[in-house]
Structures are given as C-alpha cells and as structure tokens.
Image (tube, rainbow, N blue to C red):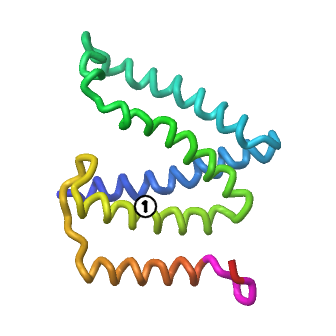
Amino acid sequence: MKSPLYLLSLFLGVVLVVHLAMNGQVGSVMKNTRVANAVFWCIGAVTAVAIGLTGWQSGALATLKQVNPILLTAGGMGACLVFAIAWLMPQVGARDVMITLLAGQIIGGMVLSHFGWLGSPQQSITMMKIFGVVIMIAGVILTTVERGKPG
C-alpha cells in the first residue's frame, strides 16, 4: 500500500514551497539572491554530511567510481534550480512559481517514466495522460494569468 508514501510526497511538496519561499525571502532581505543561495547551500551541505554520517559504513565511497560523472552534475543543477526559484518567487509570487514548476515536474516525470530513464519504472504515456496534461496546462493558464493582464 503506497498511500503513506503519497502522503509523504504531498507533505514534502508543502515543505518545498516553504523552503524555496524562505530562500527567496533571505535573498530579498540581503538584496543578493546569489549570496543567499550560497549560504543556503553551505548550510545544506553541512546538513547533508551530518545525515550521511549517520549511515556511514567502511568503504561507503568505494562505489563512487562506478557512478557516471554526468550524474554528479545533479548537485550543480540543484544549486542552479534553487537559485532560479528563489529569484523567481519574489518576482512573480509563490503561487505562480509553484503552479508552473509543478506542471513542469509532471511533464518531466511523465517523459522520464515513459522511457524508464534514470532508474524510473517504465510507465507509458497514454492518451488519457496527455489529456490530463492538457487540462493541467489550461489550469496553469487560468490560475496564473490575471484578468486583463496576460503574462
């Protein structure tokens, strides 16, 4: 039964919004989103090391040489992603950023799953799923475009 996992994912979505809004607010207060993002990533790195050490075993890094170096660029991608979102939030608002971000995640997730890329179980894109994406995009447009003020 996966219901608890879906509830955890829903909760993490809320945490993500709060986290990114906090990062954006720190950038606004400091008047420098790049420096604020660097501070957040330093704190994140220390936290990641602390969490990693709780499960540390002898030889834990031995398999690192088997990892394709391209996969390790995800750390840099994450930093750029958080920076961009933290910069966008004060510009357009948490609602619009998160709605469009979620739409992008759903589309990206569907493509990854369709091809079974990056370890995702293969789940084909169907006409029903495409219809769902079209409805979602219509919802994004309806919720992000203010009346009389496109884009």
**Residue located at (25% from left, 12% from top):** 59
Q: Residue at x 39, y 67 (%)?
A: 107
Relative to residue 96, is residue 14 drawn left or right? left
* Residue extending farthest top: 58
**Above or below — where is 24 with respect to 150?**
above
Which residue of the protein is positioned furthest toward the bottom in this rendering? 148
Residue 103 position within the rendered picture, expressed as x and y whole percent measured from the top left: 46, 68
Query: Magenta region's main secondary structure?
Result: loop
Q: Position of residue 91 (x, y in %)?
A: 73, 60
x, y percent for residue 87: 69, 51
Left or right: residue 12 versus residue 18 is left
Quadrant location of the C terminus in the rendered image? bottom right
**SS at badge 1:** helix
Which quadrant of the view contains residue 11? Answer: bottom left
Could you say which is closer to the camera, residue 28 or residue 67?
67
Looking at the picture, how far across and down is residue 39, in whole percent?
66, 31
Query: The residue under label 1 is which amino acid type?
Result: Gln
Residue annotated with mark 1: 105
Quadrant hosting residue 90:
bottom right
Q: Which residues are magenta?
A: 144-149
Tell me the residue at 67%/57% (across/down). 88
Tell whether 73 sits left or right of 5: right
Tell me if residue 18 comes above or below residue 103 in the rendering: above
Q: Residues within 10 Å of mark 1 (few under 14, many from 20)?
A: few
